[in-house]
Amino acid sequence: MSSILVLPGDGIGPEIVDEALRVLDAAKARFGLDIDLDHGLVGGAAYDAEGDPLPESTLEKARAADAILFGSIGGPKWDTIERDKRPERGLLRLRSSLGLFANLRPAILFPQLAGASSLKPEVVSGLDILIVRELTGGIYFGQPRGIKEENGERVGFNTYVYSESEMKRIARVAFDLAMQRGKRVCSVDKANVLEVTELWKEVVTEEAKAYPEIELSHMYVDNAAMQLVRAPKQFDVIVTGNLFGDILSDEAAMLTGSIGMLPSASLDENRKGLYEPCHGSAPDIAGQGIANPLATIMSLAMLMRYSLQRGDVADAIEAAVEKVLDQGLRTADIHTEGTRKVSTGEMGAAVAEALVNG
């Protein structure tokens, strides 16, 4: 038996996770999966209930589970509380506590949605990029950090730091995944300005020697941002640090037509992972039944592939999503003329039905 911890979180999190669980029920029925589900609080919901965005009880459940299905966290309701208690800090602590250092963010354009991208169809048609982002180091975690008084004014400071071992392990993840794809890796840095990324470039280059089949290239982050909108299909796998990966993966998301279409996985060294949609909690539309659940459903597919080693189930879920898109069903964020606008629940139900019917 496998175990999944379900953390719906805040905003639209509960409603999109509900649809992923509907699809999971369909997968269990079709494939006879033996999966035990547990539930927990995280983010703003956890703060409201227990005064902590990551209660110890949730962390214990996360450590015990084989994988975690995560919704979304945060919202303006919690913007004014102390920084260490804000919902986002709970997610950062969860990633750090579990050693989830490798963030995989695919940017795949479904052919049915080529017209929804902000770029010309010929630029993005056939797009299939995988961004591998280091997740537990870099400037988001570096010390010292803070805000202090200096010479009569406030000064804010953060530390951008990576160890050689952190660089090596994320490089190996990128190279291993590239071997299953197009065997091309672009390492993104700012080595002309930042010493930490100068070392990053050196370490990634050295690690590449163990993968002679991989074509390794290097690109400064500002150029990479430009190239993603100029000629995105030149990329296969992009590997980069926490800060640059955060920005570039959201940019790549919009190439696909909607960030509501993109899943992600955050893995430890043993492929235990936390799976979540790339979008945020969207509190402005929470409870309205219009959120797109497809990114969460495809995060479930990634969970099956990477943590539960059920690539067959992952393929079936992704095929069900394609079938529903072929039928012309669209949530509001991807709706175009000639397609049928459906609710969050209708989209989830359609994918579940397509999965059961094979």
Image (cartoon, rainbow, N blue to C red):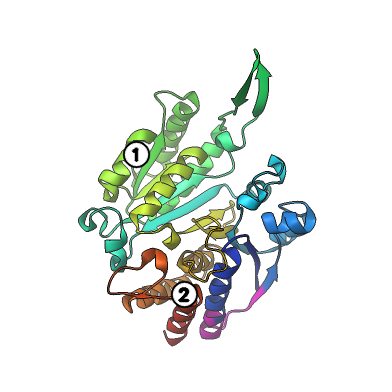
> In this rendering, is residue 237 above or below 70?
above
Residue indicated by mark 1? 224
The answer to whether residue 154 shows anywhere in this view is yes
Callout 1 secondary element: helix
Q: Residue furthest left?
A: 122
The image quadrant of residue 124 is bottom left
Q: Is residue 265 left or right of residue 231?
A: right
Which residue occupies 26% across, 44% down?
230
Residue 34 magenta-highlighted: yes
The 10 Å Cα crowd at callout 2, few under 14, some 14 to 19, many 20 or more, is: some
Residue 25 magenta-highlighted: no
> In this rendering, is residue 311 above or below 190?
below
Q: Is residue 299 left or right of residue 145?
A: left
Callout 2 secondary element: loop
Residue 113 - label: none
Q: Please, what is the three-letter code of the amino acid marked with disc 1?
A: Ala
